Image (cartoon, rainbow, N blue to C red):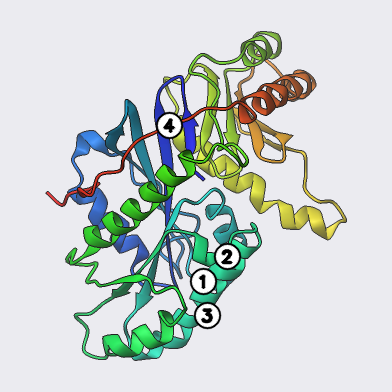
Amino acid sequence: MSIINYASREIQFKIVYYGPDLCGKTTNLQYIHQRINPQNRGDLISLATASDRTLFFDFLPLNAVVIKGFVTKFQLYTVPGQVIYNATRQLVLRSVDGVIFVADSQWEKMEENVESFKNLGDNLAQQNISIDDVPLVLEYNKRDLPNIAPINYMEYVLNNRKKRLQSFEVISSTGQNVFAALNAVSQILLHKFSKQKDIPQGPPLPVAIPVEPPVAQTHFLKKSEAELTVVIDRGGNVISQSGDMSAMDVTVIAALAAGSFAATRELARRIGELEFNALYHQGNGSHMFMNSVDDDTIMNTVFGTCTNVGLVRFYSASAAQRIATILTTLRHSTHTVAFQPSAAPVFADR
């Protein structure tokens, strides 16, 4: 779900590349990152294991078009292909605006394609989202290999629902139709967003705290003597931040912190808890404390040797309560962003 920051006049959209193990999701993002103007792209963060090129996600913020004075920012993620990382898939899908499903065209990968597509629908359903309601396009990747299934067969297997999806023959290693698929899903989600903004009823979209940090965060830093505090949503998006950010990439810290918080949820359930309300990571010189603000939000604090975790824990509880009140007010505020989406490509391969 898109995040609107009315103070900085930004609209943030999240697109997830989904598909089976080693189908080409990471290759898609690597190609896009190489071809986007360096001034309009963020760092590509890749976490690899010996068996899969993506453990958590690849994170790529892209600055795109301006809509009625609002700058649109696109975040591109991949999910791990291996089934054992399904909890991470669920995390990455939180607050998703659009999905590109990457299917491997090789005959021996058909069963994995079908299972992964079903898994996508199941994970969306856990968020009470129907797969038919999400902007979604298909990539039939690796069309340059010799042992591939014909397109009509792949359409029969993966695109046989009542609502037919746009599909593209893709060779992600060379970039063939990589941007075409990205532009297609971007246009669909922008049109969907424009229609939603024409309807005043319904729950409000997530709203970021204004650029200036709330008094609760500033007060918390002063009392706890911590270095940095960042309020993020459960999908890893930055809502508000305060403190010394000169030596840290807050965007990456937020994304990884959300992953760390979510990864412990299953561990908590094993001992009869819904989740752990707080996590503490101790380093040699710098430490991190994370605590839950509400069902959708986490507060992440970085501190050094000049303070201790007890002090941070004590003051973070009251700060979280005040921030939760601010967020509740903002989420129930009525705002509108009216615009007519353009048919022009959102991204261009240079």
Q: Earlier in the sequence, mark 4 or mark 1?
A: 1
| Residue type beneath disc 3 | Glu
Q: Are marks 2 and 1 in contact (CB under 8 Å)?
A: yes
Which residue is drawn at the image coordinates 49% and 74% (left, top)?
117
Q: Position of residue 10 (x, y in %)?
A: 40, 29
Q: Are marks 3 and 1 in contact (CB under 8 Å)?
A: no
Q: Is residue 347 above or below residue 145?
A: above
Q: Is residue 61 visible?
A: yes
Q: Tag 4's secondary structure?
A: loop
| Residue type beneath disc 4 | Val
The residue that mark 3 highlights is: 115
The residue that mark 1 highlights is: 82
Q: Earlier in the sequence, mark 3 or mark 2?
A: 2
The residue that mark 2 highlights is: 85
Q: Give the label, 3 or 4, closer to the camera.
A: 4
Q: Position of residue 184 (x, y in %)?
A: 29, 58
Query: For residue 200, which quarter of the picture?
Result: top right
Q: CA distance from mark 3 to mark 2?
A: 14 Å
The residue that mark 4 highlights is: 337
